[in-house]
Image (tube, coloured by chain):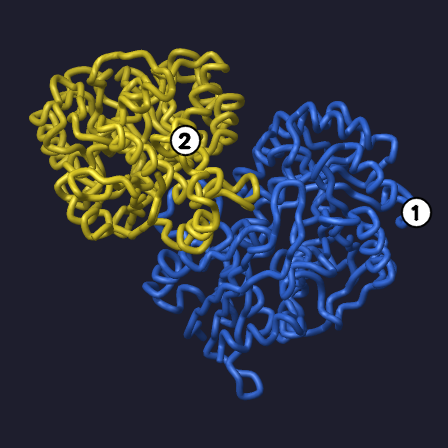
Chain colours: A blue, B yellow
């Protein structure tokens, strides 16, 4: 058994929306295909992965550094010990040959797209959804086939922002979502409060609404926002300040009784450990959002989970950033707290396939093998184009 | 005044050497040219920069994300307030448009190559060496025209490693170097001690030898190495553990009376602040090696210097990683403690031009305008090829 070809392509994300810091108009993602020498129904079995959402495609790093390293090794080095699948951890390690430690940025997404494709491939070789493969591999207890999901949106619109926010959340509610996340920090505090109150009216209570500042605030601004939202008892306050400003996070937590969520912009075990060590995150309470698709893939993410548990945190405190099929399988397969969804934006990657079932705020993947990306109708034509 | 074209090319580094973690055989660098509409002797004045040494070229990120952002803005936005030069900080800021916070890795080098080219261009427009432009811009006191330099080498060789180390350091000594840095941690401790002792014989005393583990050690190994080298009273012990493991750095420092040096793999102000906050670095003693060429350029580096001073550190504690002409000008222009040199490896980037003067362990740049890269004979043909 071997991988006979690895292909990658940059795909554009449809996302003309803004958070407090950036506009997503020109965002891109790397879609990667691992083509195996195994066949099903006369066609090669192919694993697909991508580097999540919110950063950029990594075609340059893949083509110039990573794919040549993989081309140099003997194909059997990628096969797992049972001989009936591939070893995603070995693949990630070879991809990182001669890379220095530290500087966990763009390359972490490049490696992740490949590593995730190996999980998709393994699950397809076994003919099962990826969450089952992940549960077996990492010895995670069965815990049903659905998981809490929240609809992330509530972006800023140039006109009628609160009205459009209202319409947006109503649409999510009609789709079956019960928990929502909206952006804050894009302008003055006095503009955000009506947005939060509009969202509360729709959701019914504070613990169904999270707010996300996307790392926008300095300490004093973060404290002001925290004081202003504290009475609403919101689900969480996400990325109040710079994702690496662990002091800010700790000081904020010391003065804020609600949950804080952060981690989507930490792309390695070491960066995540620094959050655990220095960020003041509370056992059993605050939320970790590290995203395997931006941080070297599942192998590294599982190391992060182990570190969290050594620190006394629970994996139910993890809600990975992302909002797509890959992270749904990861959250379900690794026993995490829940996952995110982008029901409307970031196509063709964001949100779930029609075959997923969303009932009363909990989502189940379909029985499609792997991550089921073939059922994502916006993405499927691009996958076909890449391998044909 | 405007920039009429920006070009970039990937150049291969000649470096078949290894440290404790990686081999540099396939390392690359991005060389960037900012071509202005100003002329000197009938030729356009061009600023050149590159993203230092030790990571990789960033052509993908430059071509796909950064250059399109710069192409979109009005050229006058890059001109500085005096109208007689360009604004490197504005250039870096535009290069980072719609990039999320955190994840300071490859993109930090891509931005740096451009930002440094703007400093080279500004100095050439003024017809002066770049260190003078930097001193004036950042209001740094005059302090002579030479600066301490150490020869970084002492890599591992496949055969006769100690003998070849000996020969290598003797060659550096004949060139005029008095301070040397050698690699440790590539194998067993018992192999490193004879290497250190051989180096000591040549250098004459411990404070002329630094050792560099390149982030190789776990805590216990780092403590063992520290205990073994403590009697030699070495100049510094560099990157004992993972560059982001601030706890390891702090614990090591608590038990080691010698200097510790680190920071070359931290690529942003926030990462550097975390080292200052959590890494246990001692005021007036330990060494910071952040490298502007890997971390967004001089504008960000100057923010780091300001933060260091707010924490009570001195800029004389800074010896930027790199070992090339750009960092010689930066170290001299910003009043740092000294700079590194790679006299033999990493061509065409490493080491200095023949016009630089090295006397008794202190180096002076020539009077060539800008960083004087045109005088680096191995590099000059590649610069010509890029702009002609």
Farthest residue toward the left? B174
**Quick one: quadrant of the N terminus of chain B?**
top left
Identify the residue shown where x is 68% and y is 56%: A323
Left/right of residue B382 with respect to residue A294 in the rendered view: left
Give whichever of A290, A2 is nearer the camera.
A290
Q: Are marks 1 and 2 in contact (CB under 8 Å)?
A: no
From the viewer's perspective, is residue B138 above or below residue B322? above
Q: Residue furthest bottom?
A: A42
Chain that bears disc 1? A
Q: Nearer the viewer, mark 1 or mark 2?
A: 2
SS at mark 1?
loop
Residue A102 visible in the picture: no
Residue visible at 52% across and 69% down?
A: A85
In depth, the one of B122 and B21 nearer the eye is B122
Camera-side residue of B80 and B130: B80
Q: Nearer the viewer, residue B374 or B146?
A: B374
Marks 1, 2 in one chain: no
Residue A253: x and y in percent read 72, 28
Marker disc for residue A204? 1
Residue A155 coordinates in the image, percent (x, y): 72, 49
Quadrant position of residue B193: top left
**Residue B224 occupies which quadrant of the picture?**
top left
Q: Residues within 10 Å of mark 2 (few under 14, many from 20)?
A: some
Residue occupying the point 19% across, 44% down: B43
Location of mark 2 (residue)? B80
């Amino acid at each position: 058994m071997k991988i006979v070809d690895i292909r990658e392509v940059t795909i554009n994300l449809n996302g003309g929306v803004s958070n407090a810091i950036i506009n997503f108009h020109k965002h891109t993602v790397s879609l990667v295909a691992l083509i195996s020498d195994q066949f099903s129904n006369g066609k090669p079995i192919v694993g697909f992965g991508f580097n999540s959402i919110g950063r950029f495609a990594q075609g340059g790093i893949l083509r110039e550094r990573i794919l040549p390293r993989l081309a140099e090794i003997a194909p059997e080095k990628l096969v797992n010990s049972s001989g009936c699948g591939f070893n995603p951890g070995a693949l990630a390690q070879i991809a990182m040959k001669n890379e220095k430690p530290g500087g966990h940025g763009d390359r972490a997404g490049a490696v992740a797209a490949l590593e995730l494709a190996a999980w998709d491939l393994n699950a397809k070789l076994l003919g099962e959804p990826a969450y089952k493969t992940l549960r077996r591999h990492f010895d995670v207890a069965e815990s049903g086939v659905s998981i809490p999901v929240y609809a992330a949106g509530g972006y800023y619109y140039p006109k009628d922002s609160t009205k459009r926010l209202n319409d947006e959340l109503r649409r999510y509610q009609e789709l079956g979502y019960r928990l929502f996340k909206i952006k804050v920090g894009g302008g003055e505090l006095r503009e955000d409060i009506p947005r939060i109150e509009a969202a509360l009216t729709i959701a019914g209570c504070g613990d169904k609404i999270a707010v996300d500042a996307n790392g926008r605030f300095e300490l004093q601004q973060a404290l002001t926002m925290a004081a202003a939202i504290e009475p609403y008892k919101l689900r969480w306050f996400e990325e109040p300040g710079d994702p690496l400003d662990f002091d800010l996070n700790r000081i904020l937590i010391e003065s804020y009784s609600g949950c804080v969520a952060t981690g989507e912009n930490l792309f390695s075990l070491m960066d995540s450990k620094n959050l655990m060590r220095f960020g003041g995150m509370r056992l059993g309470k605050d939320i970790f959002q590290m995203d395997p698709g931006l941080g070297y893939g599942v192998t590294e993410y599982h190391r992060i989970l182990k570190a969290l548990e050594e620190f006394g945190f629970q994996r139910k405190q993890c809600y990975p950033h992302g909002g797509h099929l890959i992270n749904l399988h990861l959250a379900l397969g690794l026993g995490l707290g829940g996952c995110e969804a982008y029901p409307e934006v970031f196509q063709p990657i964001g949100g779930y396939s029609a075959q997923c079932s969303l009932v009363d705020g909990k989502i189940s993947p379909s029985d499609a093998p792997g991550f089921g990306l073939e059922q994502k109708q916006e993405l499927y034509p691009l996958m076909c184009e890449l391998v044909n």
